[in-house]
Image: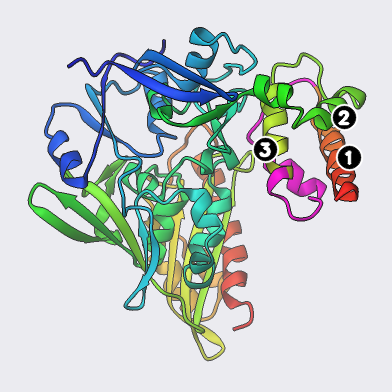
Amino acid sequence: MNDRALDISLIVNGERVQERVDARKTLVDFLREDLSLTGSHVGCEHGVCGACTVRVDDEIVRGCLMLAVQCDGAKVETIEGLSDSGEIADLQAAFEQRNALQCGYCTPAMLATAQDLLKHAKTVPSRAQIREHISGNYCRCTGYHAIIDAVEFVAQTRAKGR
Amino acid sequence: MKPAPFSYKKARSLDEAVALLAEKDARLLAGGQSLIATLNMRLSSPSLLIDINGLAGLDGISIKSGAVEIGCLTRHAQAERSDVIARHAPLIARAIPHIGHPAIRNRGTLGGSIAFADPAAELPACLLALDGEIDTMGPKGKRTIKAQDFFKGLFETALGPQDVLTAIRVPSANKDTRIGFAELARRHGDYAIVGLAASARRNGKGLADVRLAYFGVGNTPVRARKAEAALADGSIDAAVGALDLAPNDDVQATAATKKHLAGVLLRRVANQLLEAS
């Protein structure tokens, strides 16, 4: 048996996907090249920049530090799924209103990471906590202030709605 | 496609993982947060990856006869949320938020961090500071290795080619246990320029059994024994003066800077150890 390519079956953005993948293919390359989900970006490819962040079984992970074969049986959510479901519509609007993006390269992963913080937070996170949570996501345009503003605004707005 | 081709097998049992490791250039895949980065850069090119994720019984956190036992597949994020670790292994609880970033801590495992033995990593130093132990399983059965005998050199441990690290164990903290932790990194979550994990026992108004384990200053985590003795004698200044670390220059800082920062960290950590004692 050839163990260099394996059949996998997983749920991506709510849809069942069955593919044969090379064992050496990372999750983010599988999403981009095999599924044409190009919203997940490839930056440093060694876990530093955070641009490939996606959700696997409800937790954020580095798409470059997981193999596609490891996702057999998993539920994977990318920015395309998070956008379509409306789960992060308020974050997206706040990012736009506050100029929390310029080139947009880091934005899909930044949104996924911000949503991860807000989803787990029991109270409105402080600006320091927001900074710490997105510390693994590089943005080379904004200087981060506008991103912190946007995330803080959404955290406060969601808390009022509770 | 960045990594060189390799075969992939998901181990169905610990015994199967040990058996599969007999293949030339086979490597275990746990959290993969260091291994897959090195694959992507082709710094390593194994013939076979043996995925041990999902093996039952290897991700538990429990108290066993006065010690906290942590299964090798426990994720950093899981340990970060654990009440048992917060209460009984507070040094590990203090260190974990410094390891990588949330997305990394969701995948990375405690066993993987110890087995990889990066000289700038937090957990190997914590294990050394706590006088912890490492359980392994190999072709000849189980072994238990003391932390002080485990870290042999740069990314080199006492693990044999077919050994699987199965659990780590540290003494459970009691009311006299004191711990301290500090590190300096360019960005929160990055590997430390210099870091210090420490434990001690309260002894009246002072400290006994002081253990200072530095990371990022050598090929392995390093104890500063002269400084430990000076701190037990009650003088922070003397402890800083007694630091005899011999770091090398690296991409982050010069040896002189590292030595200076080691003293800065010792003052911070000594104050943590002495707090409320």
User: What kind of residue is marked 3?
Assistant: Ser
Q: Is residue A115 left or right of residue A2?
A: right
Q: Residues within 10 Å of mark 1 (few under 14, many from 20)?
A: some
Q: Are marks 3 and 2 on the same chain?
A: yes
User: What kind of residue is marked 2?
Assistant: Ala
Q: Earlier in the sequence, mark 1 or mark 2?
A: 2
Q: Earlier in the sequence, mark 1 or mark 3?
A: 3
Q: Residues within 10 Å of mark 3 (few under 14, many from 20)?
A: many
Which numbered dot is residue A94? 2
Q: Residue, x 65% and y 15% (percent of image)?
A: A39
* Pointer 2 chain: A
Tags 1 and 2 touching, CB below 8 Å = yes
> Mark 3 = which residue?
A135
Which numbered dot is residue A153? 1
Quadrant of residue A58 within the rendered picture? top right
Q: Is residue A91 left or right of residue B102?
A: right
Tell me the magenta residue range.
A119-141
Question: In the picture shown, does residue B211 fall above or below A119?
Answer: below
Task: Give the camera-side residue of A25 and A34.
Answer: A34
Q: Residue, x 39% and y 45% (percent of image)?
A: B113
